[in-house]
Image (cartoon, coloured by chain):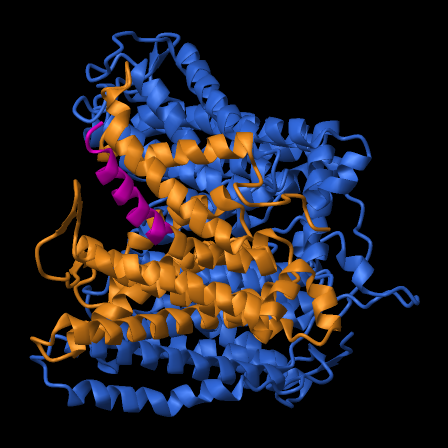
Chain colours: A blue, B orange
Amino acid sequence: MTTTETAPVIPLPARAATTLTGLGALATAASAALPWTWTSDFPGDLTYTGAPAGLQWLAIAAGVLTLVLLLATQGTPGLRWAAPTRSNNAVLLAATGALAVAAYSVTAITVELGGLANLEPGGWILAGGGLLTVLGALGLPLDRRTAVPVRILDKRLFLLLPAAPLGWYGAHAIPDDQPVAPVMTALSGALAIAAGAVLLLQLGHLANSWLRLGKADRPLPPPRRLPSWVEVLVIIAAFGAGLYAITFGIDTEYGELFTGYLLLAALVAAALTRSGLITRLRTLTVQHRPVTTGAAFAAAASFPFTQSSDQYTSVATNILIFATVALGLNIVVGLAGLLDLGYVAFLGVGAYAAALVSGSPASPIHVQFPFWAAMLTGAAVSMVFGVLIGAPTLRLRGDYLAIVTLGFGEIFRITMLNLNGTTGPKVTNGSNGIPRIPDLEILGFDLGKPHTVAGIELGRFSNYYLLMLLVTALVVLVFARVGNSRIGRAWVAIREDETAAEAMGINGFRLKLLAFALGACLAGLAGTVQAHVSYTVTPDQYTFADALPPNSAFLLAAVILGGMGTISGPLVGATLLFLIPKKLEFLSDYQLLAFGAALIVLMRVRPEGLIPNRRRQLEFHEAATPAPPTGEPTALTKAGA
Amino acid sequence: MHDLPQQLANGLILGALYGLVAIGYTMVYGIVQLINFAHGEIVMVGGFGALTAYLALPGGTTLWLALPLMLIAGILVSTLTAVAAERFAYRPLRNAPRLAPLITAIGLSIFLQQLVFSFYPDAKKARVFPKIPGDPFSLGSVTIQRSDLFLIIAAPLCMLALGWFVTRTRSGRAMQATSQDPDTAKLMGIDTDRIIVMAFAIGAAFAAVAAVAYGLRSGQVDFRMGFILGLKAFTAAVLGGIGNIYGAMLGGIALGLAEALATGYIQHLPGMHLFGGGAWKDVWAFVLLILVLLVRPQGLLGERVADRA
């Protein structure tokens, strides 16, 4: 185990450090009142005095939050709730958030407008404020490990450093008219990137052993008992704030604002976790389960009412579809431990089934089922396919299931392409798909038309958003109820050790088949709504890996990134994985490349995901916990993994 | 049915290609129980390595001279990629729960595909690969493309070499021992890490041979070629009994034959006239996999499917 101490990184008098941090935070927030640049060419128009816009709001948020956390850790009466642990590391994290927003804004302005000359005094104050905040926070007494040995990368990797310029020279030595010249240029580029990565990684290791930041064991003081109506209000306020933060993210209009938002959101989440506020809130939500569930649902349902147009509710609807399917996959992967690599095909089965019975003029079956019947059809057909695929494979080792589902996903797509009338029976129109799927009408309520509720006009996507939210709620309910039941516990037992579970009398095959079929059924259910939302179903919507979610690889990634076996994990993971590619269009060419690399890195660094299941987190990090001080060989503890 | 010999020949050639790729899956699986999803991409990378060598040679070089050089370049690139992947992606996860390396493999597969897609010049569409020029041979009623000669010669040679390596050399026997019981093998003084790297490297070398064969056959390589090829090869490995080297080749040939026969004859079955031809061949290969898993899950030559605790 590592030992920790509380000491500043930069030796400053305590008072000076506090003042410096506070002043920096104030300057960061105040800079938003001044223009950051002189021209309105930069997105968001940051040229006004006293009227913050876009990135400037982020600077205000970062500055104010740092200040609040600083005052809270200093023990200011009335603010102590914000930092129950009194850890200055929380202040440092928030300060890093301020610096990140400042550095990103200044860099973006400089690069996009061409030169530092485009910064107005507001921009300079922002940069200075951000820097000052972090410098001051580094002078606060921080939780640090006593010693971090300097890690040096494998010596052979440093061979890349001289190799990169050599490669560059080599690429230029080849005349341009050679057919191989572009290949060499690409190769030398790859070499340069690899060398850069090695350099950055080594610098990171050096910085880590200098900063030595760590996590001290700070016991939370017992919470002050509040009247229960106050506690309920606190929960509602927290969900309101959460809704506001997420709405801000979805409504960002340009990539720069979203990048800044993402940077700040990540660091603020880290800061609030370290300050202990998140733990406090979690204790509260556990005490008031029904209120929490209600508040979460109400917050989600009120999203369309915050929107003035349908532009972002369509994004939110698609996020909801993606998240629901990811949650269904989480039953299969997270609870039962079955790796399903073709999950999107079940969504496709549901969507195609719904499209065929929707009354679309392109469907060869000229029937129009009412919505409830279409939903049941989609779910049932999906479940039948789940059983067909699962029954032969689930008796075998898990790896077979992975490859069979991968094959199924591909075969589904090929089959839908082939059923076009020339290479097969005419059912699906091949690559053109089934277009013109009519809008749903439930109990005389046409979801395709705008409706006015409480003075706010809800457009087509808002209607579908609310319908989809009901489906999501259903899936959440199924997940929660099944997960805590006898069946769910049996799934977890099978996931951990199938042999031991069977020895305890669990019928492994039957329960695995149940999980697989249930997962397929829920995906089919979501598919029926998706078919109506997107008007058209085509085979290309259901591929293994593609730049746009949902597809099988992104679904799996949403589950793993968010955290396997939890409800909130896949929801957060799906939201992030949908918004990042959507908002950062400049990434579009390298999006899948970054995605692949991120999967590899994530598995090495944080295999349990952002919101880990407690048990899984222990399992993944069991090597890091000290071995029990008995004479038992440590290999025994590994046997279950 | 007069074209049966032709279909059988097509199936054998295709099967040899699947078998070569399947070796890589089966060797790695036999030793570390990992489905290396990225193996299809190792094939693809090997194909592009060979293509690069071809482009680097002065124009007009005869293929007889170019082919060995392309082969060496392809083997070099795919082996290096596979060894690097093992070292930096898989090895740190050796004791992690099972899902972790599988997901790493998926990530690696997407990463390699996109790397070639984004950075190899003009790889956004298929790139032309040289073919062996000349008219096809005729042996009785069977016609064989000249480009397939490479595969017909290379596949048996590779198999013989691998058989000799595994049974006759010290390293090969160490590899067998490791696949039977890694812990005991370690106690006997075998450097299992080295053996694992070797399994990845041999699989990758075979993959490169397969990639060159694929390129010669179809006259092109593209960044997506590894996906379906890998899926088929894995099916072949399961068909023959995963973990068994000879099974991989046998499974490959069985799959190739089944595919050729399905392409040629399924439309003649009553009621199936719409499901024949090239468009459905992947579907039939997959149906075969499901049937095999139902009837003989251990594969043609496999012995056990039970979990090793």
Residue A595 at x, y percent in the picture: 40, 57
Residue A489's quadrant in the figure?
top right
Residue A305's quadrant in the figure?
top left
What residue span does the magenta drawing correspond to? Answer: B1-18
Residue B40's quadrant in the figure?
bottom left
B289 shown above or below A365? below
Q: Does A61 appear in magenta?
A: no
**Front one among B99 and A28:** B99
Q: Which residue, as the protein is rendered here, is positioned at the far front?
A: B140
The quadrant of the image that shows the N terminus of chain B is top left
A535 shown above or below A136? above
Q: Does B9 appear in magenta?
A: yes
Total labels: the figure holds 0
Is residue A415 shown to the viewer in this render?
yes
A351 shown above or below A636? above
**Front one among A636 and B136:** B136
Is residue A94 shown to the viewer in this render?
no
Residue B131 at x, y percent in the picture: 15, 61
Give the left or right position of residue A490, taking residue A22 as reference: right
A249 shown above or below A352? below
Q: Residue at x 45, y 88 (%)?
A: A158
Give the left or right position of residue A620, taking residue A637 as reference: left
Residue B62 at x, y percent in the picture: 12, 74
